[in-house]
């Protein structure tokens, strides 16, 4: 510790020499601190050479006698420590403002040597805890901010001795523990108190209500629990009260309306329950009312119309029911209205069109019905209209986008019909257009114009028609394109792959023709490409070679005729789902496909494929174990309205749509081709398989002996082949099997029994073979006695079956349950988070 001291003295000596010994102690102190800083470029005026005093230096203010009274260097780019600051040299300093610099290290306890300090702002630095035990009271201190630093530990006790505090900001640190009950008593002059974004816990002290001058109480983002202290409603001076993002519960007190000076009330992200008190109508000055994401219920009180200063009303993610009160039209200052994700019913009051300042209207995911108010949007600068997931019907008002301010239009999943308003074409700020799941119609080329910011376009499940114009290629920001399930036709414009940012492209179930355009560059962002059920034709599209990050590829049900290229197994190594069914692909199945290490679903059914099943398939890594990892086809697009992809899977004989997660499905379908040779024995290594369909080929040889190793198999179909030999007894180990078809082969011998097989008692499973015998066929095996014993065995078996059915119901319930929550998950991030957290805890 000697060395720093020597250095320190040397610096002083040096400085003193340089300055011809004319500098005052306070100047020396400033220069000494400047010299200690790693970056003090902004302090060039702090120089000992000049003929002026430090009073003219940047950030310094002196009194008439030349004492420094203020040092104010906010956002001055300073980095370094405060250690070398000689506080004792500034007995008259009243204000020290160093906020928003890059100061590091501990806050020096010697700060207390500033006897006159009234204003201290060290906010937005990287400072750490002072030695609190050595801090002495600063009786003159009125303003203290240490916001956005790296402080932690309990509420600093010395603050209680700063009895003249008016402004206290400890926000954005990591303080913890309770707010001391004494605070209100010790600092009675407090006007602003900000403790938000810390880890303070416990209940909010009722005693805070005894701060007679308090105007701002900011406690958001802590871990406060307990109820809303009723006492707080007596604070008639309070203008800002933010309690959001805590774990507060209980009801909102009736007296809330007595906070008549309140301008901002933030209660978002808590667990408040019960109804919204009528008295809220008395808060005439309230500008922002945030109740998003609580457990509130009951009707929205009509008294809300009396909040005529209100600009933001966020009641989303609660359980409000009943209708939207028409009094809402009296809230003439309203700019943002968010009622989404409640249980509101009835029609949207026409009076909503009277709100001339409304720019944000989120009513999605309720039970609203009726038509959209005719004048909505006509004279309102709406930039978000969210009405998704309701039961609105009728046509869209033609004036909906007349202000041309629209950024988000989400009308998906309603019963809307007719054409889109023509003003959509001219909404050049449009970012998200979601119309999926309605009965909208019209020529798509006439409704869409130039939208260079468009990132989500979902018009799926409507009756739009026409071809895609080349203006589509100008949507360079597009991340999600879902045009599926319409009557779109024609070829894709050749400029198509100008859509360089596309992550998700679903054109399925339309009448597109021609070929997928080729691309010059790599299309590295594309993750899902689904063009199934169209009339695309020709060779396997070479553009896919450039889509290196493709996870899901579906070319099914088109008119492709060519071989399946070998490169697919090499260039598209991230493929997890590959569906080529119902085309005219011919030739052998490329062995290279076995190198697709993530492949979880392979559907090549209903083509003209020949040759044998590659033995290398035994090496399909991702099929070798049960897939725990969920493939969530969520496109990276973070707004409140996330978009989830879809995978259509032909499973157990029918099509199912898997949305959002397909971890449940690992399978292989090679059925209805002209495959020959034996079933590779290695296929029984693919123990993750849930379904395997090799039916309707020309496979010969016997069923692999270890087929029973596929322990998660739920569906096995190898019917309509030329398989011979006996059915391996291991098949009775397939405990999950619920669908089995071995018919129309040349199998012989005794049908194995036991376990799950006993439930599969439909004789047609085994029909049309040459020599099968035993249950469930009525053909007895040689050597068996003909009399069917009404025996214990039979009873036993019935009992097993009952248990199995129970098991099925449980499984079915589980799967249904998953669907239920997934249904909920689509819409809101907070819910998603909440639900996933819940699941995590299970
Ligand atoms: C010294 O003071 C004189 C007169 O006040 C002024 O003109 C001159 O620029 C000053 N010099 C420096 C280096 O500040
Ligand atoms: C502050 O300056 C005044 C003169 O301007 C002086 O009288 C007083 O003693 C100083 N205060 C302190 C605490 O030194
Ligand atoms: C701070 O105030 C408390 C009384 O609340 C007192 O006991 C304590 O001594 C004071 N601390 C200092 C350092 O003055
Ligand atoms: C809520 O508070 C937690 C810490 O308590 C914080 O991690 C989170 O970011 C906050 N969320 C919001 C939306 O402010
Ligand atoms: C609101 O304030 C009035 C007048 O001070 C008082 O009579 C009433 O009890 C308060 N209401 C509630 C619910 O606290
Ligand atoms: C608040 O609600 C969340 C989610 O429903 C729950 O996990 C949490 O336990 C609740 N907290 C309290 C204090 O009730
Ligand atoms: C709204 O305020 C007026 C007068 O300020 C009052 O007469 C009326 O009852 C209030 N409306 C509701 C629904 O509370
Ligand atoms: C709204 O919900 C409350 C309970 O949460 C219930 O008592 C009331 O009947 C519901 N009202 C309507 C209109 O559904
Ligand atoms: C408030 O709205 C209701 C219903 O729309 C209306 O009858 C009433 O006159 C409005 N009150 C005021 C003060 O504008
Ligand atoms: C494509 O995948 C690679 C990793 O293989 C990744 O680094 C890259 O960011 C991905 N590109 C896009 C656009 O997602
Ligand atoms: C598919 O195979 C069938 C039967 O071998 C044949 O008739 C048909 O022409 C083939 N189609 C194509 C496009 O190769
Ligand atoms: C599977 O892969 C391993 C190692 O890569 C190789 O030795 C083996 O021959 C492969 N098996 C088949 C059936 O291709």
Image (tube, helix red, strand yellow):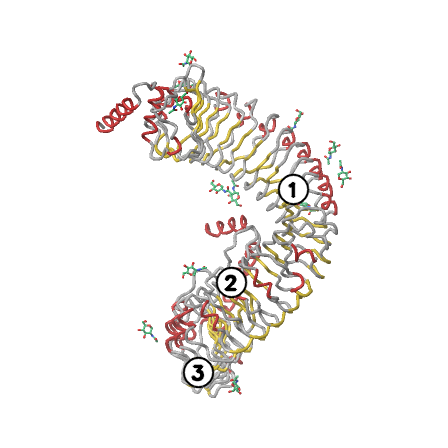
For label 1, count other residues whose C-alpha is less than 10 Å away and answer few (under 14), some (14-19) or many (20+). Answer: many
Could you tell me if residue 775 is visible in this image? no
Helix, strand or loop for disc 3: strand
Could you tell me if residue 313 is visible in this image? yes
Vertical placement of residue 21 versus 666, above or below: above
Locate residue 468: give its quadrant: bottom right
Q: Are marks 3 and 1 in contact (CB under 8 Å)?
A: no
Question: Foreground: 819 or 171?
Answer: 171
- Disc nearest the viewer among 3 and 1: 1
Q: What x and y, as percent, mark residue 312?
A: 63, 40
Sequence order check: which comes first, mark 1 or mark 2?
A: 1
Left or right of 824? Residue 106 is left
Which residue bears the numbered disc 2?
811
Sequence order check: which comes first, mark 3 or mark 1?
A: 1
Which residue bears the numbered disc 1?
335
Vertical placement of residue 119 versus 828, above or below: above
Locate residue 305: give its quadrant: top right
Question: Which quadrant is home to the N terminus?
Answer: top left
Q: What x and y, as percent, mark residue 831?
A: 54, 49
Vertical placement of residue 469 versus 237, above or below: below
Residue drawn where x is 60% and y is 25% of the image: 237
Question: Foreground: 683 or 315?
Answer: 315
Helix, strand or loop for disc 2: helix
Question: Foreground: 203 or 731?
Answer: 203
Q: What is the spatial separation of the Cα atoms under label 1 and label 2, in whole angstroms?
A: 48 Å
Q: Are marks 1 and 2 in contact (CB under 8 Å)?
A: no
Q: What x and y, as percent, mark residue 81?
A: 34, 31
Picture quadrant of ligand 7:
top right
Point out which mark residue 362 bears: none
Which residue bears the numbered disc 3?
750
Left or right of 124? Residue 646 is right
For label 2, count other residues whose C-alpha is less than 10 Å away and answer few (under 14), some (14-19) or many (20+). Answer: few
């Amino acid at each position: 510790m000697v060395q720093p001291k020597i250095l320190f003295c040397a610096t002083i000596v040096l400085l003193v020499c340089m300055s011809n010994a004319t500098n005052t102690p306070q100047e020396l102190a400033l220069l000494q601190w400047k010299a200690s800083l790693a970056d003090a470029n902004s302090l060039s005026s702090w120089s000992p050479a000049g003929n002026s005093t430090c009073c003219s230096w940047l950030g310094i203010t002196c009194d008439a006698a030349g004492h420094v009274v203020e040092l104010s260097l906010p956002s001055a780019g300073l980095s370094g420590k405060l250690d070398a600051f000689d506080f004792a040299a500034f007995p008259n300093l009243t204000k020290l403002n160093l906020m928003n610099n890059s100061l590091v290290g501990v806050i020096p306890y010697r700060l207390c040597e500033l006897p006159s300090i009234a204003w201290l702002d060290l906010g937005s630095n990287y400072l750490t805890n002072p030695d609190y035990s050595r801090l002495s009271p600063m009786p003159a201190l009125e303003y203290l901010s240490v916001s956005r630093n790296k402080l932690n530990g309990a509420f600093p006790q010395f603050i209680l001795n700063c009895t003249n505090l008016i402004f206290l900001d400890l926000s954005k640190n990591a303080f913890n523990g309770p707010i001391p009950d004494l605070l209100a008593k010790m600092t009675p002059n407090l006007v602003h108190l900000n403790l938000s974004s810390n880890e303070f816990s416990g209940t909010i002290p009722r005693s805070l209500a005894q701060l007679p001058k308090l105007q701002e109480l900011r406690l958001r983002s802590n871990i406060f629990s307990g109820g809303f202290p009723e006492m707080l409603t007596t604070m008639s001076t309070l203008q800002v009260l933010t309690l959001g993002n805590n774990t507060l519960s209980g009801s909102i007190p009736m007296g809330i309306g007595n906070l008549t000076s309140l301008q901002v009330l933030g209660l978002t992200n808590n667990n408040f329950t019960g109804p919204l008190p009528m008295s809220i109508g008395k808060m005439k000055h309230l500008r922002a009312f945030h109740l998003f994401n609580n457990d509130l219920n009951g009707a929205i009180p009509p008294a809300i119309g009396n909040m005529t200063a209100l600009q933001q009303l966020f009641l989303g993610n609660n359980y409000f029911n009943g209708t939207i009160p028409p009094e809402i039209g009296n809230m003439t200052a309203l700019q943002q209205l968010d009622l989404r994700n409640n249980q509101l019913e009835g029609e949207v009051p026409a009076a909503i069109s009277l709100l001339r300042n409304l720019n944000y209207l989120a009513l999605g995911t309720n039970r609203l019905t009726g038509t959209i108010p005719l004048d909505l949007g006509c004279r309102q600068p709406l930039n978000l209209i969210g009405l998704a997931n309701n039961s609105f019907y009728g046509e869209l008002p033609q004036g909906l986008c007349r202000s041309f301010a629209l950024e988000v239009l989400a009308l998906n999943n309603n019963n809307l019909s007719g054409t889109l308003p023509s003003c959509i074409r001219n909404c050049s700020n449009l970012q998200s257009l979601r119309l999926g799941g309605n009965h909208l119609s019209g020529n798509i080329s006439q409704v869409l114009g130039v939208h260079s910011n468009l990132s989500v376009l979902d018009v799926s499940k409507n009756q739009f028609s026409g071809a895609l114009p080349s203006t589509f290629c100008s949507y360079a920001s597009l991340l999600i394109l879902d045009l599926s399930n319409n009557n779109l036709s024609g070829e894709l414009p050749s400029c198509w792959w100008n859509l360089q940012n596309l992550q998700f492209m679903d054109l399925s179930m339309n009448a597109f023709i021609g070929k997928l355009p080729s691309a010059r560059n790599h299309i590295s962002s594309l993750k899902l490409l689904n063009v199934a059920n169209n009339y695309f034709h020709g060779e396997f599209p070479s553009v896919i070679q450039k889509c290196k990050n493709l996870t899901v590829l579906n070319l099914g049900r088109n008119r492709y005729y060519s071989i399946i290229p070998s490169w697919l197994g090499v260039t598209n190594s991230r493929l997890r789902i590959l569906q080529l069914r119902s085309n005219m692909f011919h030739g052998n199945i490329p062995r290279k496909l076995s190198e697709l290490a993530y492949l979880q679903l392979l559907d090549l059914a209903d083509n003209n494929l020949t040759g044998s099943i590659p033995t290398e398939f035994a090496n399909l890594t991702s099929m070798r174990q049960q897939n725990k990892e969920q493939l969530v086809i969520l496109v990276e697009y973070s707004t409140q309205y996330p978009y989830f992809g879809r995978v259509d899977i032909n499973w157990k004989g029918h099509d199912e749509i898997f949305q959002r997660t397909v971890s449940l499905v690992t399978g292989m379908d090679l059925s209805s081709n002209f495959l020959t040779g034996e079933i590779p024995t290695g296929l029984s290594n693919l123990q993750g398989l849930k379904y395997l369909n090799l039916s309707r080929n020309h496979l010969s040889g016997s069923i692999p002996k270890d087929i029973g190793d596929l322990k998660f198999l739920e569906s096995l179909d190898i019917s309509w082949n030329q398989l011979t030999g006996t059915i391996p007894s291991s098949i009775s180990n397939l405990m999950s099997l619920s669908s089995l078809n071995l018919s129309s082969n040349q199998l012989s011998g005794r049908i194995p029994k036991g376990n799950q097989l006993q439930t599969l008692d439909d004789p047609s499973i085994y029909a049309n073979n040459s020599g099968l015998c035993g249950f469930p066929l009525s053909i007895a095996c040689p050597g068996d006695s003909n009399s069917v014993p009404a025996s214990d065995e039979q009873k036993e078996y019935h009992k097993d079956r009952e248990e199995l059915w129970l098991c099925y119901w449980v499984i079915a319930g589980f799967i249904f349950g998953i669907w239920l929550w997934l249904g909920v998950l689509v819409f809101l991030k907070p819910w998603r988070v909440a639900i996933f957290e819940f699941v995590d805890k299970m």
